Amino acid sequence: MADLLIELFSEEIPARMQARAAEDLKKRMTDGLVEAGLTYGGAHALSTPRRLTLAIEDLLEHSPTVREERKGPKVGAPEKAIEGFLRGAGLTRDQLEERETPKGAVYFALIEKPGRPAAEIIAEVLEETIRNFPWPKSMRWGAGSLRWVRPLHSILCLLSREDGSEVVALDIDGIKSGDSTCGHRFMAPARFAVTGFEDYAAKLKRAFVVLDPKEREEAIWQDATNQAFASGLEVVDDKGLLAEVAGLVEWPVVLMGSIDDAFLGLPPEVLQTSMKEHQKFFSVKNPKSGRIEKFITVANRETADNGVTILAGNQKVLSARLADAKFFWENDLRIATSEVGMEGWLESLGNVTFHNKLGTQAARIDRIAALAREIAPVVGADADLAEQAAKVAKADLSSEMVYEFPELQGLMGRYYAEAAGLPQEVANACEQHYSPLGPSDDVPTEPVSVAVALADKIDTLTGFWAIDEKPTGSKDPYALRRAALGVIRLVLENDVRASLSAIFAKGYEGANTADLLSFFHDRLKVFLRDQGIRHDVIDACIAMAGNDDLTLLVKRARALEDFMASEDGENLLQGFKRANNILSQAEEKDGVEYSFGADKKFIEDAAESALFDALAANEAAISSAIEAEDFAAAMGGMAALRAPVDAFFEAVQVNSENSVVRRNRLNLLSQIRKVCGQVADLSRIEG
């Protein structure tokens, strides 16, 4: 067994590509080695801005010899067929073996592929991996044909054993493999040789390179939080930024700087976004006031003045950036608090196309406002406030701040609405109407926000349905699946009782509301399956009337799921399916529908009589429970039928020779179908 160490050393790799590239290197190398017969014990990949590293442990040093028996043409087959077989097998005529088979004499070839040394296989697989690496973007440099994300400088490829190590020979466009690498670009740039992974990692650490990105993340976060804590402050958590910054440095040095007092009055989100997007700085806030007061930057080197010069330069650049943000903020506030207010921004949205077939943003805002007014009573919102909120909710799209930082849309709308003196419900709706954007997002609960959020998403969905721009397969360029899930969560988590079909009809004209409702049902299945409700249970409930009231539909599905998970539910389902099958076959055979109800005077058996009484007693109870939307009670009524149904099928033969008795029993089965069918279409549930 041997260990393999690979390092691909280049100019700086973009931070966003490093983790994926490390995994791609690992997968392509291990897949290629295993396919060639080299199994291994373990593998792990690491990355820094300048290197991709792969370490493989317990690798076979030689691929095994493989023997394969291949069946060829019949003896006496045309010469061309035999020659083709020989070429494919790499053999000569005298190496073939004749064997008798039930179909006559046939040629067989025994092909032996001798094993190969690991180094030979590694070189082939690594060259193939490098030349066909799946970078999102790559470049060529110099006169060579090799493409890499940034110029590739060196390849370290080392096979280590207990008795020493050897370089796996490789030459790609003049870049020859070796056993050496470089340390930190500024602090230890000299090359040095290594003997294996442990030696490599230790020497890199001494050369100011932290190889493991997770270790860099932990070091940055620990040092940042310690420095903030010492000043009575705390770092704003941002895992995405932490991962990105760890991909920008090989030797992280955490420095905390101050923000000029002139900018401390900016909204904290503006400060945080500006520092993150432009400078890759962490925000440091005062936990008592929530105000952003300092910043954390991560340098890539230690300096003699302990980072004083670096901080001074960063603070100078930051001040210039924040001066722009301050100008945008103050200019936007001036407009928002003017006589025309936020509605002054709406005029410019008349020149912004939402979609070439769906008109401008201004036209869309008018539609959303009208729809929000219609939805308001359904969600308990004031109709005037809902309409007002919908009209200004997207006004901040014309603001300078949102033009500079699009991710602040909605949030800035709230700030501007508050500054303009609009009702707080209106201001909150400006921020919340985009939500939920994903499955983990919070769902708005304030009635005005709910009304505008629903109107926004339903206008989008009905609009794209009207122009027949629906999601297909994995393609969903307008995020319509996400919009539908947002509507579902808004409805369910706010316990909204409404007919979606009726609301769709008030949306964009021309939408196929039945098809759109079907789309919603598909999204609902995915949503509920993630919560443990079976797809067939959902189908059984969707088949019932009122299936466009999602809250009612889900309430029914949850109760049915619980019932089907019980012993009573499982057994009653089998009885129902048996009754339904017998009844369906008889109706098809006889050409009539047995739906008139059984007559007790034709009953012959005690079990038959007991079922008749149980159905009569429970039908009204189940019906009343469903009318009251007490599905748990309805399922209780269903459970009471389990024993008499079981007893009936144990004791009674439905297809009696007496035609009157047979017809009466079939009508009794139709009563089972009718009573159970009040709850859900049980025929859709898999037995």
Image: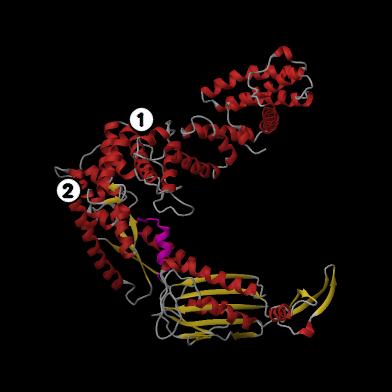
What quarter of the picture does the N terminus occupy? bottom right
Q: In which quarter of the image is residue 639?
A: top right
Q: What is the three-letter code of the residue carrying label 1?
A: Gly
Q: Which residue is drawn at 49% across and 76% down?
A: 205
The image shows residue 552 at horizontal and vertical percentages of: 49, 31
Q: Which residue is drawn at 42% across and 32% down?
A: 499
Secondary structure found at label 1: loop
Q: Quadrant of residue 614?
A: top right
The residue singled out by tag 1 in the image is: 380
Ranked by sequence position, the earlier of labels 2 and 1 is 2
Residue 260, visible in the rendered structure? no
Residue 245 lies within the magenta run: yes
What quarter of the picture does the C terminus occupy? top right
**Which segment is the magenta one?**
230-248
In this view of the protein, which residue sits in the foreground, 225 or 511? 511
Mark carried by residue 335: 2
- Per the model, the C-alpha gap separating discs 2 and 1 is 32 Å
Q: In this view, does 261 lie above or below 245?
A: above
In this view of the protein, which residue sits in the foreground, 591 or 212? 591
Q: Which residue is drawn at 54% across and 70% down?
A: 45
